């Protein structure tokens, strides 16, 4: 992605930060119509809709972002999470799970993905898988030595739930 495009994205994000979501939406709509825009433009256009609770319009933008490609790993992760979260909010749990599973394969140790995966699993009434996912994430992310003294048995419990 070019520096000029990154500057344009920041202008759109500034509008949103200043409490001007409709202006930000119009800005990103215009930006997405320019030739050869990057996947990142579609990502932030989707996030703008997401920010105002309009997941339905955000979803196709996230898909377009993934199809065009996103260079930055964190932004790619964010795109997967935002897309899956939008599908979850729209009640399309199987699709949400599909994107989170794909994201988990790409980023197997990412706590954000694991947490959103657990939310989708919970909504699907997969309570054991939810506890397993959150429990292992807690152990992976914890700096609490008292908790880590019990890591081995806890991992065993979480993995055998």
Image: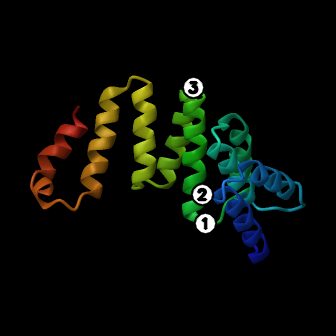
34 left or right, relative to 56: right
- The residue tagged 2 is 76
Q: What SS does tag 2 mark?
A: helix
Tell me, yes or no, whether the two marked residues, 2 and 1, touch with CB atoms within 8 Å: yes
The image shows residue 121, relative to residue 22, as above or below, that is above
| Image quarter of residue 50 | top right
Q: Look at the image and tell me in which quarter the C terminus lies.
A: top left
Query: In x, y percent, where is residue 90?
Result: 60, 29
Residue at the outermost front position: 19
- Give the residue displayed 50% in from the left and 41% down from the top: 101
Q: Look at the image and tell me in which quarter the N terminus lies.
A: bottom right
Q: Which is more toward the observer, 90 or 113?
A: 90
The image shows residue 51, relative to residue 124, as above or below, that is below
Q: Which is more toward the observer, 119 or 68?
A: 119
**Label 1 crowd (10 A; few <14 / some 14-19 / many >=20):** few
| Image quarter of residue 132 | top left
Query: In x, y percent, where is residue 82?
Result: 58, 46
- The residue tagged 1 is 72
Q: Measure the alpha-carbon separation of dots 1 and 3.
A: 29 Å
- Give the residue displayed 74% in from the left and 66% down from the top: 11
- Give the residue displayed 41% in from the left and 46% down from the top: 114
Q: Measure the alpha-carbon separation of dots 3 and 2.
A: 23 Å
Residue 91, numbered circle = 3
- Give the residue displayed 26% in from the left and 43% down from the top: 135
Q: Measure the alpha-carbon separation of dots 2 and 1.
A: 6 Å
Query: In x, y percent, where is residue 87?
Result: 60, 34
């Amino acid at each position: 992605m070019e520096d000029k495009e990154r500057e344009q994205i920041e202008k759109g994000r500034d509008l949103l930060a200043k409490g001007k979501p409709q202006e930000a939406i119009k800005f990103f709509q215009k930006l997405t119509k320019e030739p050869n825009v990057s996947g990142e433009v579609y990502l932030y256009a989707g996030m703008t809709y997401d920010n105002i609770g309009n997941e339905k319009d955000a979803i196709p933008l996230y898909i377009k972002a993934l199809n065009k490609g996103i260079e930055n790993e964190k932004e790619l992760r964010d795109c997967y999470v935002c897309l899956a979260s939008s599908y979850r909010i729209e009640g399309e749990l199987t699709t949400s799970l599909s994107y989170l599973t794909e994201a988990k394969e790409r980023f197997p140790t990412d706590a954000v993905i694991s947490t959103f995966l657990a939310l989708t699993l919970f909504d699907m009434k997969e309570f054991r898988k939810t506890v397993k996912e959150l429990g292992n994430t807690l152990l992976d992310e914890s700096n609490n030595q008292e908790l880590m003294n019990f890591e081995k048995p806890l991992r065993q419990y979480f993995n055998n739930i």
